[in-house]
Image (spheres, rainbow, N blue to C red):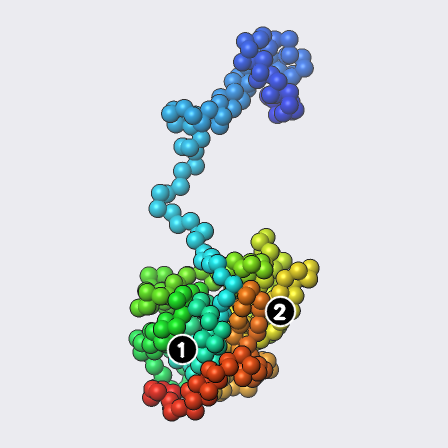
Amino acid sequence: MSLWHKIPNKRKLELAEMYRRGDDLTPYETECGMKAYLITREVKFLVYYQDMFAASGTDDPRFNSRHLFPTPPNAKIYDDQLEIDSDDVIVIGDIEIPDHSRNYLLHVLYLAMAQNIKTLVIAGDFIATDMSALSSWTTTWRTGDLNYEQVIQVMNGILATLAQWFDNIYIISGNHDDRIARATDGHLHLGMFLRSSTVVYSRYAHLWINTSRGDVKISHPKNFSGNPIVLGQKLYNVEPRKAHHIVAHCHRQQAGWSPDGRYEIHGLGMGRDVKRTKYRSQSVTAHNEWDLSFHMILNAYHYPMGIKSVDWDLWLGPFKTSLDKGIAREPICENER
């Protein structure tokens, strides 16, 4: 039985160097507990594999490390998440068309105009996809809901309006947006239905913003929490790239700090109208109330913008009159009546 495995690695490498020099390995039989020809056989294998991994410049595939463990040439590399540079951004999320709040979107648009912010990030769940064909929720209340095609038409109309002001609109994927992809085994996704060239869609559930006061990670996590700050702190802890965090999906507006006290953590809130949300209005639950809120990054500083908790006269200036007229105006489409 070979005792080669009991020899320390350092000594094996020394024997390999002796073999390369042409030294006789017979004097080492007693030390190794092996005959010289057995030592030579093991050392030859060691030298062979040393050359295989070291001589990467040769064209011989046996000794070229470029030929080792090949991957398919068309294999997807998941390193193309969105990353943008800006100190001025409006972040909205969980709009969930067609149950969106028109009041919410008016506040978003007029604040962007008042503060001259031209970049918009939609942090997932832009559409609701609550129709029975795409949702696992059992239909118990027939209400004549819109089908997917009609929802897409409403979505593109809203994007067309937003694109009249915003130069850049970015959308990341949320759990609602993914329902069409899950229903079609990934063959279809929301980005295929976007008709505005202004919009950039990412199938990832997060993106990065590089600001002059540090990076910002906006995410639509799979986890739902009634306390998005705690969830955001957990996300911060496992993320090697330290940054401010803005957390969507939880429908709560909150503000806090990372566990080390260095970065801000924000719960985004949402833009869905509770009165239009069947599953929320129909049932009685112990869930926290949802917060109609979005987020503004202005000069790289963070401002949670709760619809009920902000002095809009201060932030909107002369645009407050336009907002008031828009809110008081009659609904513009049948499903808003």
Considering depth in this image, is 325 or 283 the residue closer to the camera?
325
Up/down of 238 relative to 23, above or below: below
Characterize the local packing of mark 1: few (<14), some (14-19) or many (20 or more) Cα atoms within 10 angstroms.
Answer: many
Question: Of helix, strand and loop, which one carries label 2?
Answer: helix
The residue that disc 1 covers is 97
Rendered residue at 58%/16% (across/down): 17
Q: Is residue 180 above or below residue 85?
A: below
Q: Position of residue 20 (x, y in %)?
A: 54, 13
Image quadrant in which you'd find residue 10: top right
Whole-percent x and y of residue 258?
Answer: 65, 63
Q: Is residue 178 visible?
A: no
Residue 288 in which image quadrant: bottom right
Q: Label for residue 229? A: 2
Q: Mark 1 and mark 2: span between their CA atoms? A: 26 Å
Look at 47% across and 62% down and name the residue there.
205
Q: Amino acid at mark 2?
A: Ile
**Residue 279, placed above or below residue 236:** below
Work out whether residue 166 or residue 97 is closer to the camera in this orientation and state it.
166
What is the x, y in percent for residue 46? 53, 22
Specify the quadrant that holds the C terminus: bottom left
The spot of residue 145 in percent (x, y) is: 36, 83
Could you say whether the residue bearing mark 1 is in a helix, strand or loop?
loop
Q: Is residue 9 visible?
A: yes
Looking at the rendered structure, the kind of residue marked 1 is: Ile
Report how many numbered discs are placed on residues in the image. 2
Write the residue at 49% across / 70% down: 91
Residue 337 lies left or right of residue 234; in this view the side is left
The first of marks 1 and 2 along the sequence is 1
Instruction: Reply above or below: 220 against 327.
Output: above
